[in-house]
Amino acid sequence: MESGKSNRPVAVKILNEKRPATILDAPSGDGWLLRDLDYQPEVTGLDLFEEKPDGYKDFQKADLDYGLPEDLGKFDAFVTCEGIEHVGNPLLLVEHASRHLNDGGLIVITTPNIWFPAARMQFFLRGFFPSFPCLVGKIKRGTHMHIMPWSFPQLYLYLKLAGFSDVQLHDVDEKKPKHFFERILGIPQRAYCRKKIRKAKNAEEKQFWTHTGSDQSTYGRRLVVSAVYQPKTKNAT
C-alpha cells in the first residue's frame, strides 16, 4: 500500500473519534477524506492541482507555500495528509492553521518518516533520504516535489512553535521494523529515549520521549501526528 494511502485509515480514525463538525482539508486531493469518514461534517478543501471534490462545502485553489488564505473562517479541525513534505514554509502553514482553528481545535498531519534506520543508512551513504531524492533538473514551483523531510521530534517542534499542545504520535499498521538489521541499529536510540524518560522533569517531557522512542518513531515509514490548539489567555487582573 502506498505511504499516503496507508496513513489514511489512521487520520480517519482520529476524526471519527473526535467528530469535528467543520474541517479544513489541505491539500484535499480527490476528496477521499469526506468519503472515508463515517459521519458528514462540513469540509472545505484547498488544493493547487485538483478541483472541488464532490460533497465539499467550499473549495479554493491555493499554494500552501504561502500559508492559508485569510478568508477561510474558523474550523474545528485542520487536516493535511501527505502535504507538509511538499511545503517550503511549513512553520507558516501550521501557524496559519492555528489562526483558522476554534479554541480546542484539532490538527492532523501525515507525512513520510525519515528516522527509521534504513533511511539513516541511505542518508549516510548517499546524502539523501528515501522519498527525498536530489531534484536537480526537476526543480519547478507548483510541482509535487518532496522537499522537507520529517521526523516526529521535528514535527513536535514546529507544532509547539505554532502554539499547539498535546502533540500525539499515532500508530500506523505497518511492519516495524521492516528489516531485522533495523532492530539492531535502533537499539541505541531506544536506549537513549528510555534514559530521557527516566530523567523527565514533567509529564510533557515524559510523553515526548515516549513517543520519540516508540516503534513508530524509530522504525516506522510513516508519521501520523495530531495536536490541539488551545490559545493562552492572559490572567485576569
Image (tube, rainbow, N blue to C red):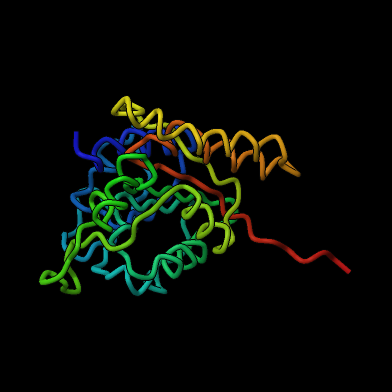
| 123 or 6, nearer to the observer | 123
x and y percentages locating residue 80 in the rendered image? 35, 53
The C terminus sits in image quarter: bottom right
Q: Is residue 104 left or right of residue 110?
A: right
Residue at 46% from the left image edge and 47% from the top image edge:
152
- Asked if residue 96 is positioned above or below residue 41 in the image, the reply reads below
Position of 45 with respect to 164 (left or right) is left
Q: Residue at x 35, y 74 (%)?
A: 66
Q: Hey, which residue is sitting farthest right in the picture?
A: 237
Most extreme residue toward the front, as rendered?
125
Q: Residue at x 46, y 44 (%)?
A: 20
Residue 207 screen position, x and y as percent: 62, 39
Can residue 16 be seen by looking at this rendering? Answer: no
Q: Horizontal and vertical percent for residue 1?
A: 19, 33
**Numbered-mark total:** 0
Foreground of the two, 193 or 139? 193
Quick check: 232 above or below 194? below
Residue 125 in the figure: left or right of residue 219: left
**Residue at (18% x, 50% y) in the render:** 30
From where the camera sits, is residue 214 visible? yes
**Rendering quarter of residue 51:** bottom left
